[in-house]
Amino acid sequence: MRNPIRSEEDAFRFVLLTIGYFALIVIGSVINVWLGVAVFVALTAGILWWFVVRRTDAEAPVRQAPAPHAPEHYRVLVVANETVGGAQLLETIRERIAGRDARVLVVCPALNSPLRHWASDEDDARSKAQERLDASLVTMQGAGIQAVGEIGDGDPIQAIEDALRTFRPDELLVSTHPPGKSHWLERGVVEKARERFALPVTHVVVDRP
Amino acid sequence: MSAAVEEHHGPPPIHYSSRVSPSVLGMFLFIASEIMLFGSFFTVYFFDRVVNHSFGGQWPPPGFHRPAFVAGVNTLILVTSSFTMHWADSSIKKGNRAGLQAGLVLTVLLGLAFLLTQVIEYHRIGFNTSDTSFAATFFGLTGLHGAHVFVGLTILTVMMVRAFRGHFSPEHHHGVEIGGIYWHFVDVMWIVVYVTVYLL
């Protein structure tokens, strides 16, 4: 869920909504006090419902495709966090780049708690993600895969979106723990990625990193 | 297997894509603390209104008159100032400096008109802070809001001076954006104060 007020424009829209909200309550109260209370309850419940339920649905993904790049390289974007050094993932990357002049970018989202995220306190999350990424890049190098890596946004979908703009991949690999152990699967990250991004998305399950 | 190291330019140094910028976040946190402050005043007001039966359940107590019409006109003035503020912000985003300047001047004038009307209202209202708890909460809430209007006006005046000195551009107008958010907050709080204190 995103903060609905992110700019002066949003704040101004909020002013207009506030006027409408209170105008209806006052009109209801003028007719009858209990009608005013009913309008207040109904409007407040409606707003809460819209904010919590409807708004989440309304964030329908805009399907995005990466901008085209020179055809001589095949570009693979790998998004993984704890599973970033997993054997299954390494094997899949190897398959994808076999016999190709390929470039691999590994994005490790800096997972953070919602409270810290809102307070922009992400140093710790980023440094932990950096440690995982560094170790994984060394593992990959040992496995004959040359890749570069970067820390992404705490939201994996946002991290993919960011990387799409700068890396322009041909394929996306999303690595997760198996179902039942994976938060990302629980949150439908793979499905969302398939819905939102117009490029082949492969889900790699890594049981043990 | 020939995987080359990608020479990539990387993302922006700080990821802002999924959150607000630190300065805007700071303003939101400040506003959140302000909402709590107003919340405590509203709590006192409603407590007094619901619990205090000294006047036979009459609200406001007998002999007290709330100048709802004058405050209504004042509400219109303040709501209009939100429109002019939004005009100023939209103008600078389009590179229209004259619009920014005119919008800010109008917003400051409307804000001043609001404060002046409130001072006159206090002068003529016919009761004082020490006349019953109703009077105390009335002056507490409206006075607290008035203080915020004063702070907002100070911010707006600084913005206005900067606008006339050639500051701000379509790319750099953070000062207008943040000041605008604060002004809209002041407006929203007045709508809540007006409805609860003067109308209901």
Image (cartoon, helix red, strand yellow):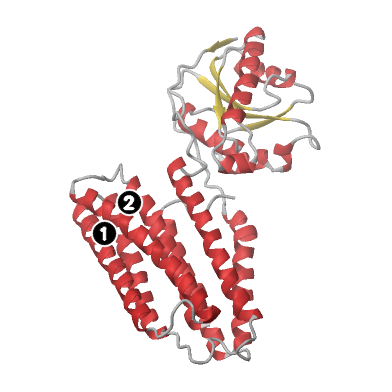
Is residue B116 shown left or right of residue A44?
A: left
Q: Position of residue A79 (x, y in %)?
A: 62, 28
Report in which chain the residue with disc 2 lies. Answer: B
Distance from label 2 to label 1 (Cα)? 9 Å
Q: Amino acid at mark 1?
A: Leu
Helix, strand or loop under label 1: helix
Q: Position of residue B132 (x, y in %)?
A: 53, 81
Seen in the image, is A153 located left or right of residue A190? left
Q: Residue at x 62, y 89 (%)?
A: B57
Report the amino acid beneath label 2.
Val
> Which subunit holds the residue at mark 1?
B
Look at the image and tell me whether residue A16 can be seen.
no
Residue B25 in the figure: left or right of residue A33: left
The answer to whether A34 is drawn above or below residue B153 in the figure is below
Q: Quadrant of residue A176?
A: top right
| Quarter in which the N terminus of chain B is drawn | top right
Residue B25 locus on image (x, y percent): 48, 46
Which residue is at a point 48% across and 92% down the rendered structure image? Answer: B63
Tell which of A158 and B179 is nearer to you: B179
Of mark 2 and mark 1, the one earlier in the sequence is 1
> Residue B44, which numbered label?
none
Pointer 2 and pointer 1: residues touching (CB < 8 Å)? yes
Question: Which element is circle 2 on?
Answer: helix
Q: Where A33 sits versus A157, above or below?
A: below
Foreground pick, B48 / B158: B48
Residue tagged 2: B176
Q: Residue at x 51, y 13 (%)?
A: B5
Q: Which mark is residue B104?
A: 1
